[in-house]
Amino acid sequence: MTKRYVGEIFQEIRKNRGLTITEAAGKAVDRSFISKFENGQTDISLTKLIQILHNIGLTLSEFSEEITQNENNLEMFLTRVGTLFHSRNFESLKEMQLSQKIHWQQTHNKIYKVNFILISSLININQNPSVSPANVQYIVNYLFDVGEWRCYEYQLFSRVIHILPINIIDYYLSIIVTKYSDLDKAIQVAIIKSLENRIVLAIDNNDLKFGNHWYQVLLKFDIPDGEAYLTIKRKLLLGMLYIMDSREGSRGIHVVQQQIALLREIGFVRMAAYHQDQLDQFIQVHHKK
């Protein structure tokens, strides 16, 4: 947990209670210290933290509960965003987008602006670019400034990977791969799915070089236990890349057909039918018989 994050939570509680910086400081610290604390620019001792928490009507235990609740809410928020996007419920996404914008304007908590940019990138995903360069840089700066990532930052990274510059993605993936085995399974799955989406994008754009690059990156991340579909999906993507390569077309068709048959065997009948339709269309586009 970073000092910036703790300070932002403190600031949000203070503002929600209608208290000024002067009131929060009281006789414990000066106003400039509160400002620096809220912006993550200074450390704070436990004694001073307890004192300024008292000034805004909170105990240390209550503040800890607020932080935990906030982290849980952020994870739930990202889950809901993902669910709405995959169900193409853009009206609800726009409502969430507006809500984050209003929270940002009221509190200036950076997380709200980050969430606003994330939702904007999903709503406008078919546009190029889906968000402005300035907003992309805002996300990059946030991920860099936050220091030690929590679950929220890992999940956020997996959801904004489609707008980040390749050098930034490669930089963070090189760090993530060293910590990957210790991450929560949900985060591991999110990272794998985000990389798969990069490969799908390359396939859709008929960019074999780009697709092969991201497939090699994907291979660095082991599939968590119990995720049979991710194993099959990885081989399906490999087969599609083979089909795009004129030298490996027949091999690719064979690989994809094998995985479709496996989907049927384990009871994923609708998924198998979906991938069969994809394969038929893909073969037609690439003139593979």
Image (cartoon, rainbow, N blue to C red):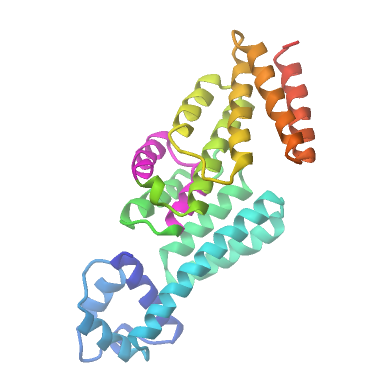
Quarter residue 172 falls in: top left
Question: Which residue lies at the image location 45% right of the left edge and 43% below the top edge?
Answer: 133
User: Does the magenta portion include 259?
Assistant: no
Between 37 and 233, the one lying in front of the other is: 233
Left or right? Give the position of 157 relative to 226. Answer: left
Q: Position of residue 124 (x, y in %)?
A: 62, 46
- In the rendered image, residue 227, in percent from the top left (x then y), is placed at 59, 44
Instruction: Judge whether 277 appears above or below 269 on screen.
Output: above
Q: Quadrant of residue 278?
A: top right
Q: Is residue 126 visible?
A: no
**Residue 86 rendering spot, x and y as whole percentages:** 67, 49
Q: Nearer the viewer, residue 38 or 54?
A: 54
Is 27 positioned to the left or the right of 194 in the image?
left
- Does the magenta run of residues contain 165? yes
- What residue appears at the point 62 percent right and 22 percent down from the top-left corner? 239
57 shown above or below 157: below
Say which residue appears at 58% left-offset and 46% top-offset.
Answer: 226
Of all residues shown, which one is farthest toward the top?
Answer: 247
Q: Quadrant of the C terminus?
A: top right
- Can I make out residue 169 in this image? yes
Q: Residue at x 46, y 82 (%)?
A: 16
- Span colored in magenta: 152-178
- From the viewer's side, name the closer residue of 224 and 179: 224
